[in-house]
Image: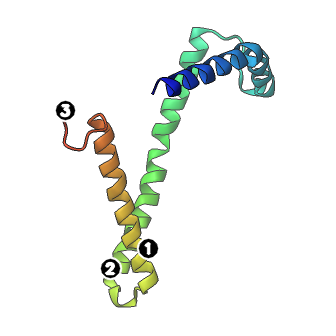
Amino acid sequence: MASKMHLLQSKAAEASKLVSKHGCSYYKQLLEQNKQYIQEPPTVEKCQQLANQLAFTRLASIPVRYEAFRKELDYVKQLFKNSRDIKTEHAGIAALFGIECFAWFCAGEIVGRGFTVIGYRV
């Protein structure tokens, strides 16, 4: 255990040296590559304006996303109405999707409880 801790410390020190040596140049390069996204002047008011634009643009996109959801729901309803026409391949894909959603739900619950299965730490 002590050897693993020493190895981890040496790796962390090596990474820290790398970041301190190249971090500033990487930061400058990143800003230079993305300067078209930088708003001038960088004021609090400009940041607030951009935040409001983002929030209201997302609000304005709700009807479009809702309409797309309704179309998907209508498609699923049609599939259930014509359930005799469903291929085994489509049923298998739907079952795998359902299992995957359930697995992500379970994983989220476990993470939410602090990576414990039963809800408390022993």
Q: Earlier in the sequence, mark 1 or mark 3?
A: 1
Q: Residue 114: which disc?
A: none
Front position among marks 1 and 3: 3
The residue tagged 3 is 122
Front position among marks 2 and 3: 3
Residue 60 percent coordinates (x, y): 48, 40
Q: Residue 80: which disc?
A: 2
Q: Is residue 39 visible?
A: no
- Is the image coloured rainbow, by chain, by secondary structure, or in one colour? rainbow
Question: As drawn, which residue projects farthest toward the bottom?
Answer: 84
Q: Residue at x 19, y 43 (%)?
A: 118
Q: Earlier in the sequence, mark 2 or mark 1?
A: 2
Q: Residue at x 67, y 20 (%)?
A: 14
Q: Is residue 47 left or right of residue 36?
A: left
Front position among marks 2 and 1: 1
Amino acid type at mark 2: Phe
State the separation of the CA atoms marked 2 and 1: 15 Å
- Which residue occupies the foreground of this view, 30 or 41? 30
Instruction: Rate crowding at label 3 as few (under 14), some (14 to 19) or many (20 or more) other CA atoms within 10 Å.
Output: few
Check the image and report above or below for 122 versus 48. Answer: below
The residue tagged 1 is 93
Amino acid type at mark 3: Val
Q: Is residue 50 left or right of residue 100?
A: right
Instruction: Rate crowding at label 2 as few (under 14), some (14 to 19) or many (20 or more) other CA atoms within 10 Å.
Output: few
Q: Residue at x 43, y 66 (%)?
A: 72
Instruction: Rate crowding at label 1 as few (under 14), some (14 to 19) or many (20 or more) other CA atoms within 10 Å.
Output: few
Amino acid type at mark 1: Ile
- Residue 74's quadrant in the figure? bottom left
Check the image and report above or below for 87 versus 31. Answer: below
Residue 57 percent coordinates (x, y): 53, 36
- Which residue occupies the foreground of this view, 122 or 104? 122
State the separation of the CA atoms marked 2 and 3: 47 Å
